[in-house]
Amino acid sequence: MTGTSPLDLLATGHLLDDEETAIQQTVRRFVADHVRPHVADWYEHGSEEDTVRSLAREAGKLGLLGMHLTGYGCAGTNAVSYGLACMELEAGDSGVRSLVSVQGSLAMFAIWWFGSEEQKQRWLPGMAAGELIGCFGLTEPDFGSNPAGMRTRARRDGTDWVIDGTKMWITNGSVADVAIVWAQTDDGVRGFAVPTDTPGFSAPKITGKLSLRASVTSELVLESVRVPAEAILPEATGLRGPLSCLNEARFGIVFGALGAARDCLETTLEYAASREVFDRPLSSFQLTQAKFADMALELQKGFLLAMHLGRLKDDGALGPQQVSLGKLNNVREALAIARECRTVLGASGITLEYPVLRHANNLESVLTYEGTSEIHQLVVGQALTGHAAFG
C-alpha cells in the first residue's frame, strides 16, 4: 500500500516539537512491546491483578505515571506530551490508557493538588514508579452524573474519621494500594486517601464486562472504615475537588480516543488493500474510499482540536467547557470511526484477530465515563446560554 497515513493528510508534524515527538515515539514502542502482543488475550479472558501490576511497573520505569505532574518522582512533561502518550496508549487499548490516566490524572493528581506534604511524600514516589497503585472512588451505584447526591458518609469519631458507603465502576480498585474516596461530611464533600488494607475496606472485582476487559474494574465497599485525621485531603472542599480531578482525566481522553480511532483506521486501510472483492482490492471501490475519506477527515479534525486544547492547557488557559467540547467530539467521532471500520472488515471485524470491535466496545465505556455525552452537551450549553440545565 502506498497511501498516506490518516494522520498525515494535513502534514501536522510541525505542530510538535522534538521532545513531544520523541515522547510519542517512545510510548508507541512501549505499546508495541508490552501491550499489542497480549491485548487480545487480555480482552478475551479478562485482565488479572498481576498483569495490571506488571504493566504499571513497566509504565513507571518509562515515567508515564503522573508524567504531567512535577516533583515526587514525576516526569514533569507538558500537557501535549501527556496527551500524545494517552493517544499512543489507547491505540493499544482503552483499558491500558485508563490504567495510566486513573493513576496519574485522578489518584495521583488528587494527592498532588489537594494533599498534604506528608501524603505526597508517602504515596506519590511509589505511584510514579508503578510500585503503588491508586484508584478514585467517586461514582456510586445510584449516583454517576450527579455526584452531589452521593450517599457515602464520613463522620468524625474523636480525632479519626469513620467512612461508610459503596463506590461503583472503579478502575484499578481491586489492585489498588490507596483509594481516593469522596464522601459527604458535615462540612460538605471531602476527599480521603484510604489505604486499601484498612479494616472494613474491600474491593470486589466486577466480572461479566463486555468492555474495558483489559483493565480491572471494581466495586469499593467501606464498612466503618476508620482512618486518622491525616487521611483527609486538606485542600479539597466541596465538589470542586473531584470535579477538578475529572477535568484532568478528561483531557487525556480527548487525545486518547483518537488513538483507538487511528488504530482502527490504519488496520482497516491495510485490510482493504489486501482483501479482493470482484477481483479488485476492496480499497479501490468508490464507496470504500468515501468511508475512508470521511473517517480520516474526522480523525484529523479531532487531532487539531486536541492539539489546540493541549496548547491552551500548557498556557494555563484551558476551561472545563473546552475540555467538554473535546471529549464530546473526539469520543463520539472515534466510536463512529470504529463502527464504520467494522463494516469494511465485514465478518473479520467481529474477531479478535483485528482490534476494531475491541476498540468499539471499549469506546462505548469511554463515551459514558468521566461525563456522559449528555453531561458534556449541558456543560457546553450552559457556557453558550448562561443557563444551567442539569437535573
Image (cartoon, grey):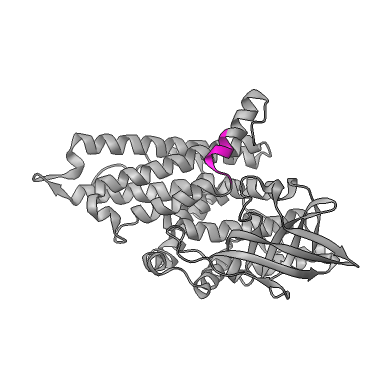
**Left or right: residue 119 compared with residue 105:** right
Q: Does 328 appear above or below 387?
A: below
**Viewer-proximal residue among 164 and 43:** 164
Q: Does 151 appear above or below 343?
A: below
**Left or right: residue 209 compared with residue 81:** left
Q: Main secondary structure of the magenta part?
A: helix
| Magenta span contains residue 373 | yes
Whether residue 7 is visible to the viewer of this picture, yes or no, is: no
**Viewer-proximal residue among 144 and 127:** 144
**Left or right: residue 187 compared with residue 290:** right
Residue 206 position in % (x across, y down): 52, 65
Q: Does 291 appear above or below 181?
A: above
Toward the right, the furthest residue is: 158
**Left or right: residue 45 compared with residue 101:** left
Residue 328 position in % (x across, y down): 52, 38
Question: Considering the image in quadrants, where does the C terminus appear?
Answer: top right
Whether residue 173 is visible to the viewer of this picture, yes or no, is: yes
Residue 179 position in % (x across, y down): 68, 64
Toward the left, the furthest residue is: 279
| Magenta span contains residue 343 | no
Total residue callouts: 0
Q: Residue at x 59, y 60 (%)?
A: 170
Q: Residue at x 50, y 39 (%)?
A: 15
**Residue 332 appears in which quarter of the rendering?**
top left
Q: Report the span colored magenta.
A: 371-377
Toward the top, the furthest residue is: 385
Residue 215 position in % (x across, y down): 50, 63
